[in-house]
């Protein structure tokens, strides 16, 4: 876990990590949320909708931006203030994702920064994009 302080953070700073969406993640997400929509749980239904595999929950995909802030940038001193995301392409079970963030602005008065976030699949397609505002604890 990184421990960037507010003063350590600069515009243009970047962090990223990779993660593979597993069957176990899908099962746990279903249990925690109660979302048993067949697009996420039924291979045949997903195929009828034109997908090669079941579609990963959008909120499971987006949960990795929490890891980005809470572990990587800034890490230990993170306090997420806001998140805005879009999902231009579906994620499928088994996809390897690269989660990236880049600092685009800093607010010295309130000790938070803005980060552009992007999640791409192994083919390089954007599957999630947006921005976060992250406070940095003292």
Image (cartoon, rainbow, N blue to C red):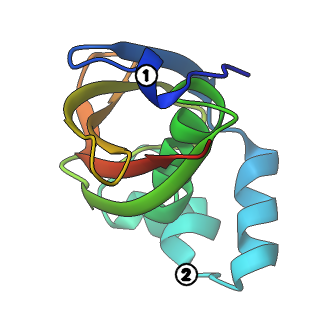
Give me the C-alpha separation between circle 1 and circle 2.
44 Å
Q: Which residue is drawn at the image coordinates 64% and 68% (left, top)? A: 41
Secondary structure category for the residue under label 2? loop
When asked about the image quadrant of residue 91, the answer is top left
Query: Quick one: quadrant of the N terminus?
Result: top right
When asked about the image quadrant of residue 93, the answer is top right
Which one is in front, 136 or 116?
A: 136
Percent coordinates x, y for residue 22 in the rendering: 71, 39
Q: Earlier in the sequence, mark 1 or mark 2?
A: 1
Vertical position of residue 109 compared to residue 119: above or below: below
Dot label at residue 83: none
Q: Which residue is drawn at the image coordinates 55% and 53% (left, top)? A: 79
Query: Farthest residue in the bottom direction?
Result: 34
Percent coordinates x, y for residue 69 in the rendering: 52, 39
Secondary structure category for the residue under label 1? helix
- Please tell me how crowded label 1 is: few (under 14), some (14-19), or many (20+) other residues with Cα within 10 Å: few
The answer to whether residue 33 shows anywhere in this view is yes
Q: Which residue is drawn at the image coordinates 38% and 46% (left, top)? A: 111
Q: Would residue 9 appear left or right of 127 to someone viewing this image?
A: right
Query: Farthest residue in the front direction?
Result: 109
When asked about the image quadrant of residue 138, the answer is top right
Q: Which residue is drawn at the image coordinates 35% and 14% (left, top)? A: 14
Q: Would residue 43 appear left or right of 85 to someone viewing this image?
A: right
Total numbered labels:
2
Q: Which residue is mark 1?
A: 7
Percent coordinates x, y for residue 46 in the rendering: 45, 62
Q: Which residue is mark 2?
A: 37
- Please tell me how crowded label 2 is: few (under 14), some (14-19), or many (20+) other residues with Cα within 10 Å: few
């Amino acid at each position: 876990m990184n421990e960037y302080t507010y003063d350590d953070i600069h515009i243009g700073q970047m962090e990223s990590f990779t993660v593979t969406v597993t069957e176990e993640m899908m099962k746990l997400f279903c249990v925690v949320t109660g979302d048993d929509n067949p697009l996420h749980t039924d291979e045949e239904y997903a195929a009828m909708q034109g997908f090669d595999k079941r579609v990963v929950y959008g909120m499971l995909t987006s949960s990795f931006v929490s890891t980005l802030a809470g572990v990587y940038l800034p890490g230990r001193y993170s306090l997420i203030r806001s998140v805005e995301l879009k999902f231009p392409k579906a994620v499928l079970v088994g996809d390897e994702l690269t989660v990236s963030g880049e600092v685009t602005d800093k607010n010295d008065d309130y000790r938070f920064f803005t980060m552009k976030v992007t999640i791409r699949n192994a083919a390089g397609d954007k599957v999630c994009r947006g921005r976060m505002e992250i406070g940095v604890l003292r």
